[in-house]
Image (cartoon, grey):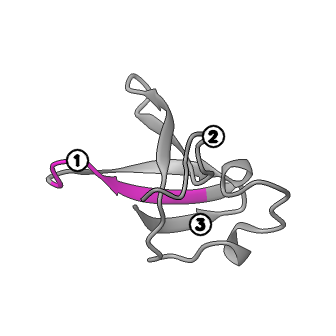
C-alpha cells in the first residue's frame, strides 16, 4: 500500500484490492509498524511511501481496516 497520511498514533495506508480496481484506507497502529518500540511514526514512514502490509482486522460495519507492517511468523526469505 501507499502511506496516505500520518498521525501520532499510526499511519493510514491506502491499499488496493487484488484486482487493482478499488482502494481503501486502513490504519497501521504505531505498535504494528515494526517489532520493538517506535518513538514516532514520522521516523519510520513518510507520506507517499510504498509499504508492505497485511490485514489483521476488518470491521465492515464500522468501515475500519486494521493493518500491520510486521512480518508474519511464517514469512521466510523465499520470496
Q: Quadrant of the C terminus?
A: bottom left
Mark 3: few/some/many CA within 10 Å (<14, 14-19, 20+): some
Sequence-first tag of 1 and 3: 3
Residue 16 is covered by the magenta coloring: yes
Could you tell me which residue is drawn at 63 percent across and 51 percent down?
Answer: 70
Mark number, residue 6? 3
Disc 3 and disc 2: Cα gap in Å?
Answer: 26 Å
Between 53 and 13, the one nearer to me in the picture: 53
Q: Secondary structure at mark 2?
A: loop
Could you tell me which residue is drawn at 44 percent across and 77 percent down?
Answer: 48
Sequence-first tag of 3 and 2: 3
Could you tell me which residue is drawn at 68 percent across and 72 percent down?
Answer: 44
Q: Picture coordinates of residue 58 (x, y %)?
A: 45, 30
Q: Picture coordinates of residue 17 (x, y %)?
A: 25, 47
Mark number, residue 73? 2
On the picture, is 65 further left or further right than 45? left
Amino acid at each position: 500500500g501507499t502511506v496516505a497520511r500520518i498521525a501520532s498514533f499510526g499511519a493510514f495506508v491506502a491499499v488496493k484490492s487484488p484486482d487493482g480496481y478499488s482502494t481503501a484506507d486502513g490504519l497501521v497502529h504505531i505498535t504494528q509498524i515494526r517489532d520493538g518500540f517506535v518513538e514516532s511514526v514520522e521516523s519510520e514512514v513518510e507520506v507517499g511511501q510504498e509499504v508492505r502490509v497485511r490485514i489483521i482486522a476488518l470491521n465492515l460495519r464500522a468501515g475500519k481496516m486494521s493493518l500491520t507492517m510486521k512480518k508474519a511468523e511464517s514469512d521466510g526469505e523465499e520470496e
